Image (cartoon, rainbow, N blue to C red):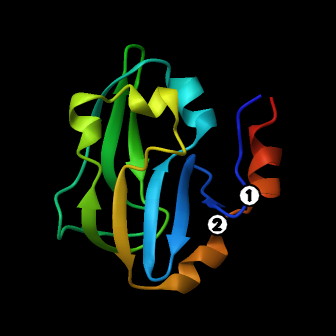
């Protein structure tokens, strides 16, 4: 069974947000990386790009599929995980330890639309 971590916020499209103050670290869940298989490329936005909750901000490509990344929150990208440019497989090794983008959130109430760990576990039970 895929790993789910307490204290994170989860979207139905299998992204998570780890909140630290006004910042959100966004990545894909363990469930998502299992479903994708071996990740070979991560398409990320640029620093200072704006992301909007519910909209695409990049993509993850694996040997068997490509999947759009959907932002769970709105904000401005303040950092991208550059390690993923050379080592996209880090998402397979530790999806929760390797966030994709860090955003300064513009509306923290959007977090209320996301799931907690227990709710996310329910939708990922096969």
User: At which x and y percent is residue 20?
Assistant: 50, 74
Residue 111, placed above or below residue 14: below
CA–CA distance in space, label 1 to label 2: 13 Å
Give the number of the disc on residue 114.
2
Above or below, 24 relative to 29: below
Foreground of the two, 79 or 72: 79
Where does the image place residue 56, in percent across and percent down from the top left?
Answer: 35, 54
Element type where label 1 sits in the image: loop
User: Crowding at label 2, few (<14), some or many (≥20) Cα neighbours within 10 Å?
Assistant: many
Query: Callout 2: helix, strand or loop?
Result: loop
Would you place residue 123 above or below residue 94 in this image? Answer: below
Q: Crowding at label 1, few (<14), some or many (≥20) Cα neighbours within 10 Å?
A: few
What residue is drawn where x is 37% and y is 14%?
63
> Given the current orientation, which residue lies at the most extreme top position?
63
Quadrant occupied by the N terminus: top right
Mark carried by residue 6: 1
- Give the tally of numbered discs: 2
Q: 24 left or right of 6?
A: left
Instruction: From the top left corner, tell me how far across and down residue 53 is, in percent.
Output: 44, 68
* Front-most of residues 64 and 21: 21
Q: Quick check: 9 left or right of 100? A: right
Residue 117 sits in quarter: bottom right
The residue lying at 43 percent from left, 50 percent from top is 99
Side of 29 relative to 79 (left or right): right
Query: Residue at 50% across / 24% down in the picture?
Result: 36
Q: Which mark is residue 59?
A: none
Comparing labels 1 and 2, the label whose residue is closer to the camera:
1
Q: Residue at x 65, y 77 (%)?
A: 112
x and y percentages locating residue 52 in the rendered image: 36, 70
Discs 1, 2 touching: Cβ within 8 Å = no
Which image quarter is the C terminus in?
top right
Earlier in the chain: of badge 1 and badge 2, it is 1
């Amino acid at each position: 069974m895929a790993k789910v971590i307490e204290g994170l916020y989860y979207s139905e499209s299998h992204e998570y947000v780890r909140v630290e103050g006004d910042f959100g670290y966004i990545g894909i869940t363990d469930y998502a990386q299992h479903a994708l298989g071996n990740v070979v490329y991560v398409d990320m936005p640029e620093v200072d790009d704006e992301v909007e909750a519910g909209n695409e901000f990049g993509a993850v490509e694996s040997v068997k599929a490509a999947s759009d990344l959907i932002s769970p929150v709105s904000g401005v990208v303040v950092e991208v995980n550059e390690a993923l440019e050379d080592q996209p497989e880090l998402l397979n090794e530790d999806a929760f330890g390797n966030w994709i983008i860090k955003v300064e959130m513009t509306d923290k109430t959007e977090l209320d639309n996301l799931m907690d760990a227990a709710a996310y576990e329910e939708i990922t039970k096969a």
